[in-house]
Image (cartoon, rainbow, N blue to C red):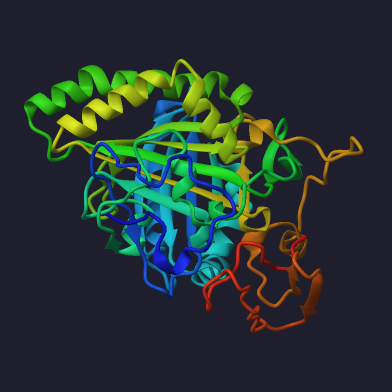
Amino acid sequence: MESAIDSRLKCPRTLSRRVSGDYAPPFPMFVARGDKALQQVVMAYFGVQYSEEGKRPQALAALGHIVESFGLADGPVRHDLTDHVDNQDHHNLMAVAYWADPAAYCRWLRSDDVRAWWESQERLTEDFGYFREVVAPRVEQFETLYAFTEDFPGIGGVMGQCSDEIEEHGYWGSMRDRIPLSQTDRLEPFGVLEIASGDPAVGGRVIVRGHDNIALIRSGQDWMAAGEDERALSFDEFLPTLEAGMVFLQESGGRAGCYSNRFVRSIDIDIDIDIDGNELDGSYNIGHWRSLDALKRWAESHPARLPLFVMFLRAVTSLENLRFYREVSVSDGKDQTFEYINCHPRTGVMRDAVIPAGGERPPQAVTRSDKAEQTWASCSWSSTWSFQDPGTRRAASLQGRRPDIRPQPRPHHPPGRVSPGTTYTLGMR
């Protein structure tokens, strides 16, 4: 048995685990492993939103266009597709994509075809909305958990390797203990969601500025290999219990610190033969939370969560072919993008975003050069970069080129990796 934290990311703890050193988990679980070259990933959710069933063919075509663009140079390593109806009775199709390198994502995003399509005025005149919600956590800022050892979904499919059985699971708070940065950092939120441009009440293009340590969870299950008895238990007991908890978060999660919650069904489309969004044997939850602590408090104490945990323990120990997994991340505000086009005002994190202090609404129109100053997604590698180490308060900046920044490791951190106290800023503050 081994730690969920990869050996290259381990360091002496200044913050203790939630369990003692002799804790033994009640059943086996595993995490994904990546090689040393993997330093930061991109988790991107591209959505198409429509209000009437008659618009589904056009919405599927729009989703198909997004999927087709993934085949361009520097496209994602992997992606999957989902469908769900939100609490405003709008349908939402999503392409969920993962990159192993933020630079590759930025090159893809800035390519002529991708940029021209997203920025086209046609997006404002169509009968449906679009959104993209993107975070780019460093490897020390996310964790995974699987009840199986191969064919990982989500970010695990990017990492490509599997651990042995791990120690940190099966107890409240194990999620935090699996995140490498939690060894020395409480992962507390800093700042609030703010409207950077646009007006959700009016529609059009709206950009929301995130904040440090927003937590993102993807928690899923698939029953593709399940037999008849396992499917019956899944559909009759597990999924209804899960859905009840997810509906609560959709309707009332804001009071608990949940910015957005989506319970989605996996689908498939074939651009060549025009398959109409076939449902697959899988579903998952996507949640954006103000902080890891807010997510943890809800998971540990809310009445809607306890039946889910009990049902999970029962399912994971008795259902051999029902596959459970989870990925949880935190990210820096500078490494987040939340952008919406003609979506209803309660879409995603837009619901809880506030107008900046001063009471004035931000400008409705944003030029491309302005976006480069306001959102990480512009990926302006030629912009000013800065480096700040809170331990020494040193700062430096370089103009016009990507710097080779190699901070000296602190004594309690292994050489060759960035310490949790070190931040890199892409000049977007």
Percent position (x, y) of residue 115?
57, 63
View extreme (left): residue:
228
- Residue 357 placement: quadrant: top right
Q: Please give the name of the residue rendered at 31% of the width and 22% of the height, measured from the top-left corner.
A: 310
Q: Please give the name of the residue rendered at 72% of the width and 33% of the height, measured from the top-left corner.
A: 202
View extreme (right): residue:
358
| Nearer to the camera, 185 or 258 | 185
Percent position (x, y) of residue 26?
26, 36
Point out the image quarter for the C terminus: bottom right
The total of numbered circles placed on residues is: 0
| Location of residue 340 with respect to 251 vertically, above or below | below
Percent position (x, y) of residue 297?
55, 28
- Residue 344 placement: quadrant: top right
Q: Please give the name of the residue rendered at 61% of the width and 73% of the height, measured from the top-left corner.
A: 411
Q: Please give the name of the residue rendered at 54% of the width and 56% of the height, measured from the top-left corner.
A: 13
| Nearer to the camera, 339 or 191 | 191
Percent position (x, y) of residue 338?
62, 47
Point out the image quarter for the N terminus: bottom left
Judged left or right of residue 397, residue 236 is left
- Residue 352 placement: quadrant: top right
Report if residue 108 is visible in the image. yes
Report if residue 47 is visible in the image. no
| Location of residue 281 with respect to 77 vertically, above or below | above
| Nearer to the camera, 12 or 92 | 12
